[in-house]
Image (cartoon, helix red, strand yellow):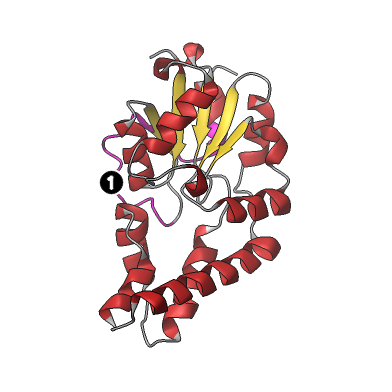
Amino acid sequence: MSQRNIKAIFSDCDGLLVNSEPLYLRATQEVLREIGVELTESWFIREQLGKGKSAIEQARQAGVSDDGIKRLRRRRNDLYGEMLRHEVEPKDGVRETLERLRGKFVVGVVTSSRKDHLEMILGKTGLRSFFDFFLTADDVAKLKPDPELYLKALELSQQSREHCIALEDSPHGARAAKAADLTCYAIPSVFTKGLDFSYVDKVLTSMRELPELLDL
């Protein structure tokens, strides 16, 4: 595929546009610690970011009921939301890269995160105006690594898949893009840089590399 033929770019959010993964880990660790479960960074990277597993499900192994898990998840989401409102920032090179993409491509956010959390991120960072559409967990029945989010992105972009690329920082996100038969560029985060991206089309070290690849 020639980069000159690209017309649409679908970008993940957490860990790629913003440095939110450490906040999510911190919030999850805090609520699990209250019930005596210690969530390690290595488990979070390997199982949640690498395989798409939910860290909160570890509470089930500690004997927490379904209702208890729902309460933990609500508390974690509230705590994470507060962190997003006050602490989340764009990653290095993101704002400058989005400036260069503006008006030249259809650009959408494609994230497994909740809509309210994405709204908090957009409100804190001021990145909203760079995007043509947003897809979140609230818009689909199945999350990454299922391809449903990316298939919806293709519909919204009104472009054929050979003219689109997906940007992902995690293996389960990249698998979703490839399952939708999209070209996928991985831009691993500090958390995911040691995971397997052998099946993606290209691995970048920073968003700053994207404009040159797109001949901008």
86 shown above or below 110:
below
Residue drawn at (57%, 45%) of the image: 17
Residue 94: name its quadrant.
top right
Left or right position of 138 against 63: right
- Quadrant containing the C terminus is top right
Q: Is residue 184 visible?
A: yes
Is residue 195 covered in magenta? yes
Residue 163: name its quadrant.
top left
Q: Position of residue 107 (x, y in %)?
A: 58, 28
| Along the viewing direction, whichever of 86 and 81 lies nearer the viewer | 81
Left or right position of 4 against 91: left
Which portion, as a residue range, is magenta? 191-209
Is residue 67 covered in magenta? no
Residue drawn at (33%, 82%) of the image: 64
Q: Position of residue 165 (x, y in %)?
A: 45, 26
| Along the viewing direction, whichever of 144 and 193 lies nearer the viewer | 144
Secondary structure beneath dot 1 equals loop
Residue drawn at (72%, 35%) of the image: 129
- Residue type indicated by callout 1: Asp
- Quadrant containing the N terminus is top left
Q: Which residue is mark 1?
A: 196
Give the tally of numbered discs: 1
